[in-house]
Image: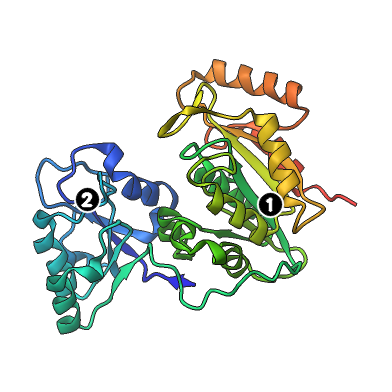
Amino acid sequence: MLELPQPYLLFLGDTTEAGFAKTAFGLRDWARDKCVGELSCSPDAISVGLPRLTPAEAKARGARSMVIGVANQGGRILDSWIPSLLAALEAGLDLIGGMHSKLANLPVLVAAAERHNRRLIDVRTPPANIPIATGRKRSGKRLLTVGTDCALGKKYTALAIARAFERRAVATDFRASGQTGIMIAGSGVPMDAVVSDFEAGAAEMLSPEAAPDHWDVIEGQGSVFHPAYAAVSLGLLHGSQPDVIVVCHQPGRTHMLGHAHYAVPSVEDTIALNLTLGRRTNPAIRCGGVCLNTAHLSEAEARQLMIAESVRLGLPVADPIRGGAEFEALVDNCLRETH
């Protein structure tokens, strides 16, 4: 699996929109101890609130790499960024990118990396020699976050659950399956870059055999209902062989992201289909609860909705970012022993 040099200097380029700096914000929110500071190439660029450092200053503070924390439209590496990227290489930092544009495809960066003996690491590159899935049951326990749609909280939910397990002294690893998750964890497999025949094998590689009481909490991708991305979701479900799934949903979202002619499935249908498909490689799979993204609701509205949905579904329902008793009940249910 990909291993990343940490700590990081976060590069914000010249972006002025918070939405285009989601990778930097994700690292700040979930891997603050791995972030030394930030760098931009424009005085108008957005800040994530970390110390502003030059690459040389970041290197002196222990940074080993600079991460492109921007996810702009088209995933492009802009010409205006090149001087800053070169300065990082010259200061002794590796470069990490999760863009569609590859660092390794830019001759000026390749030449500088060779000159300074640094690495260009493109996170959206799957590991070599991924095996075909065996379907063999592995030791250890696994939880996978699944969704009614894309981009509604599967990564944040997995991270929150992994931390909750750790607080309870449960042996746990967060297993990242997307670019930002990989940067947060420092390792993982970019499932959306894996050839379809090897998706389940990549998931087996992502979550290997472990001690019987060890939990892997696996970041989900897409949705098995999504007309474009269901293949990734299904391969991850079959290969990870989860003992527990947690369904993620955004209340009020009615149509699939980017596919307005497809309605978002119900939470009940999402539970049922994931359990049906998941039983192919783990007959004992069960649903531990539902996590809602209630960022657009008031505290009172969110709590009322969680209570009502829990009664309706007969499962714990929580917002992992809000936490509270609802989330603790969900964690309890995920960890409970079944026979």
| Left or right of 31 on screen, residue 294 | right
User: Measured from the top left, where is residue 313 in percent x and y?
Assistant: 74, 26
| Left or right of 217 on screen, residue 277 | right
| Nearer the observer, 51 or 88 | 88
Residue 287 in sight from this viewpoint: yes
Mark 2 residue element:
loop
Which residue is denoted by mark 1 in the rendering?
Answer: 168
Q: Amino acid at mark 2?
A: Leu
Which residue is denoted by mark 2 in the rendering?
Answer: 12
User: Measured from the top left, where is residue 93 in percent x and y?
Assistant: 24, 72
Q: Amino acid at mark 1?
A: Arg
| Left or right of 199 on screen, residue 17 | left
Crowd class of label 2 (few under 14; some 14 to 19; many from 20; radius 10 Å): many
Above or below, comparing residue 283 to residue 198 in the picture: above
Residue 325 in sight from this viewpoint: no
Name the disc covering residue 65, or none.
none
Q: Residue at x 19, y 56 (%)?
A: 77
Q: Residue at x 80, y 47 (%)?
A: 336
Quarter where residue 10 is shown: bottom left
| Left or right of 328 on screen, residue 231 | left
